[in-house]
Amino acid sequence: MTVPRTKPTAGEVSVDDDAPAPVVRARNLVKTFPVRRNAFGRPTQRVHAVDGVDLVVHPGETLGIVGESGSGKSTLGRVVSRLLIADSGSVEVAGRELTKTRGRAARRARADLQMIFQNPYGALDPTKTIGNAVAEPLLVHGRVSRRDMNRRAGELLERVALDPAIVDRYPAQLSGGQRQRVCIARALALDPKVLVADEPTSALDLSTRSEILNLLLHLQQDSGQAMILISHDVTTIKHLSHRVAVMYLGRVVEEGSVGEVVDTPRHPYTQALLSAVPEPDPAAQRHRRRQVLAGDPPSPIAIPSGCRFRTRCPIATAECASSDPALTKVGQDHFVACIHRDGKRASSVAS
């Protein structure tokens, strides 16, 4: 799938001290889920889904979050959106603290951050019309009357290249691509400063995926919104993001501009992910060596000591079992959590 790259390249998004204030800033986010309790109802075992994650997103920037299934990327998106309450840590959106606010203050703050879900059919109420689904956020926030809901919904549908006449239809009467466009229109209703897109194309066919991704790209160009794009597809992240965060077992193990992370990956896990991306040139593909990780990811209930990737890492040493590496700066906008970050890069991930 090829997505035309008509937005600024990763290097054109400034992340230095002169950059505008971040529109999203998350600090030390932790989210666990109890899976076993004792006789008194107290948790004795927990799934560590997100474990001490920091994120910064600037206006007009797309931050891609990538990782294999179970890495915690979707949970992170829901915690940032406050659909899940963090165990600890904080999230600021447009200067407002989101994690501790309640009532009307929380409602006002959440208007600045909207989410696009993975399954568009599951995200829409099958008993409500499209017009109702799209304009309901405006009604909840007191920005439209019931009499004007369909008119305003039609305007939003036009913005995502849908016929306004479908306001009287129901989700079951639309295709998968149309339903996802409806979800995008609903997310745009409140003119949010940030969109969190969680695998927005995984439930769609290949041609429709390209249409939705291009739509998100053009909408960002027109409105200047920031975006957090969550995906397991490294190619999608590479084409649409300015910066990327690679997650493994609840932690960010590598972060930086797309150019630096993709061209010079420093973490063994990132190298393995990139080696799995097919090369469009058949001759070049034949000469690439795939890095296959040994074993399965550890259980998020019992995380290994030290570096959590060491049980699958091809360059792990005894020191990795006792040292839990933090993200360390290795380039202008490049951070890696690995004590062997200065080691030789595997040749098979050359792009």
Image (cartoon, rainbow, N blue to C red):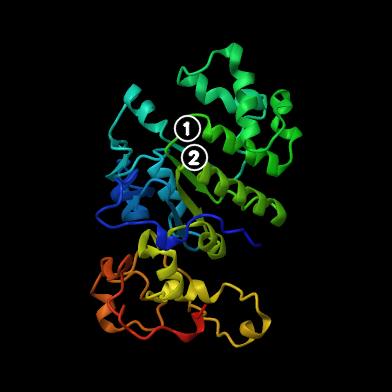
Residue 208, position as x, y percentages in the image: 70, 51
Amino acid at dot 2: Ser
Residue that appears at 32% across and 25% down: 105
Residue for badge 1: 191
Secondary structure beneath dot 1 equals loop
User: Which of marks 1 and 2 precedes in the sequence?
Assistant: 1
Residue 330, position as x, y percentages in the image: 29, 72
Task: Choose top left, top right, bottom left or bottom right for residue 51.
Answer: bottom left
Residue for badge 2: 223
Q: Are marks 2 and 1 in contact (CB under 8 Å)?
A: yes
Residue 121 visible here: no
Secondary structure beneath dot 2 equals helix
Q: Is residue 176 left or right of residue 64?
A: right
Residue 64 visible here: yes
Q: Is residue 244 above or below residue 85?
A: below
Q: Is residue 55 left or right of residue 228?
A: left
Q: Is residue 21 above or below residue 189?
A: below
10 Å neighbourhood of mark 2: few (<14), some, or many (≥20)?
Answer: few
Q: CA distance from mark 2 to mark 1?
A: 9 Å
Residue that appears at 61% across and 46% down: 215
Amino acid at dot 1: Asp
Residue that appears at 36% across and 31% down: 109
Report the mark closest to the observer, 2 or 1.
2
**Image quarter hosting the N terminus:** bottom right
Q: Is residue 168 left or right of residue 269?
A: right
10 Å neighbourhood of mark 1: few (<14), some, or many (≥20)?
Answer: some
Q: Quick one: 238 or 303, which is closer to the camera? A: 238
Q: Is residue 218 above or below residue 71?
A: above
Residue 15, position as x, y percentages in the image: 32, 57
